Amino acid sequence: MDLSLSDEQQSFRDTARAFLDKEAVPHRIQWDRDEAVDLAIVPKMAELGFFGLTIPEEYGGLGGDYVTYALAMEELGRADSALRGIVSVSSGLVGKSILFFGSEEQKQEWLPQLATASKLGCFGLTEPGTGSDAGNLTSRAVKDGDDYVLNGQKLFITNGTWADVALVFARTSDDGPRGVTAFLVPTDTPGFEAREIKGKLGLRGQATAELFLSDVRVPASAVLGEVGKGFKIAMSTLDKGRLAVAAGCVGIVQGCLETSVDYALNRTQFGKPLAGFQLVQDMIADISLDADAARLLVWRCADLVDRGEPFGTAASKAKLFASEAAVRAANNCIQVHGGAGYVDEYPGAKYLRDARVMTLYEGTSQIQKLLIGRAETGVNAFV
Ligand code: COS
């Protein structure tokens, strides 16, 4: 399905796919079993432009559009969602926050490094006590002379143990979401500790961590944007993050489609290929429909971003549909494969385990529904 993609967009997608088919797909099972991707792939991905895609050229990026970004995220999701997460958190959530809310000095300092992945970032919003209710976070930042001193804990932080800089959201006053401020914290600051969380169902190749902040002292110049505006930074950045998650999910669905078709054509039962059975075609048709529908929602959202139109609700719709579709498609994929689908020699099992978190992080499916419902009715169900 190539809906009016430019030559440059198609070319980036083709190059990305060829690269990932060579450098990631053959290794993803081992990375998953080892619970760690080989980070040697990160600079190679950066060279291709994955990290700098939508960062402007003046800050060391490619200055690309969001449709191309969505294509890149789709290819990463098709190859290995663990890699997609590294990119979309470091250059997406962290890089975009700095790009849109940072001072010129912060942009000059961090963006060229994030665009080339010489440094990685992590996004410290979620806490043990606040997941969906992010505006109630309890980590604190107290002004002390020209500095701020941060204390608190963050949970389920992608890239947490790999990151060089953490975008930490902490409370500077007791005013709910309006009392939250964003800080750029180098992870080698004394008092900052990251511990990897093991035993995840999926995304096992990706470092997910718990962060501990004990009297972490940063200068006032570490504040990103304005004091008390951190929640807005988090929310508007997550709108774009949801687009990236949704695009990655399209890649999962696409991967499920390709492997299911391949298996159905080559596996023979009752004297004919599985593809000749109507009930197998039924499952493949469902995966194909999910791929098209999810991709169209993603491209619509990316196009809105590129045209400077409001896109928050479109991002929620794309994320809601694509993440649920990814789980559905992975289940269908395993069903097409029968017993073979249950072992990781075939990609369906990993697609399912990786897809499962997509309906949870960056806003659960229920949060997306309430955001869509709020946009449609004007009634806020969160109060
Ligand atoms: N862009 C910019 N500003 C936004 C925004 C957005 N998308 N969404 C909310 N805001 C602003 C509001 O305009 C409001 O500003 P004012 O103080 O000027 O009125 C402020 O932020 C508070 O907004 P709201 O009242 O909606 O806050 P809530 O606490 O009700 O937020 C939800 C509710 C559920 C929407 C929010 O907490 C949320 O998205 N939760 C999910 C968190 C999440 O995705 N976690 C995953 C973390 S990364 S794995």
Image: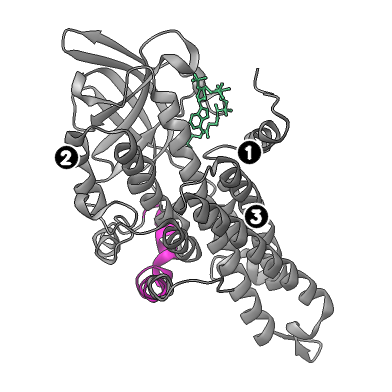
Rendered view: 303 above or below 147: below
Q: Is residue 83 left or right of residue 110?
A: right
How far apart, in angstroms, are the residues tagged by discs 2 and 1?
Answer: 34 Å
- Secondary structure at badge 1 equals helix
Where residue 44 appears, as percent x and y from the top left, is 26, 65
Q: Is residue 383 left or right of residue 147?
A: right
> Dot 2, how many residues are within 10 Å of its Cα: few (below 14), some (14-19), or many (20+)?
few
Say which of 83 and 205 sits in front.
83
Residue at disc 3, CB closer than 8 Å to ligand 1: no
Q: Which mark is residue 368?
A: 1
Report if residue 219 is visible in the image.
no
Q: Which mark is residue 327?
A: 3
> Dot 3, how many residues are within 10 Å of its Cα: few (below 14), some (14-19), or many (20+)?
many
Report if residue 372 is visible in the image.
yes
- Secondary structure at badge 3 equals helix
Residue at the image position 50 percent from the left and 54 percent from the top: 302
Instruction: Check contact, mark 2 vs mark 1: CB within 8 A.
Output: no
Where residue 151 appears, as percent x and y from the top left, is 32, 16
The kind of residue on which mark 1 rests is: Gln
Where residue 43 appears, as percent x and y from the top left, is 24, 60
Which of pointers 2 and 3 lies earlier in the amino acid sequence? 2
- Secondary structure at badge 2 equals helix
Find the magenta span and give its range: 14-36
- The secondary structure making up most of the magenta span is helix
The kind of residue on which mark 2 rests is: Glu
User: Can you tell which quarter of the image residue 196 is in?
Assistant: top left
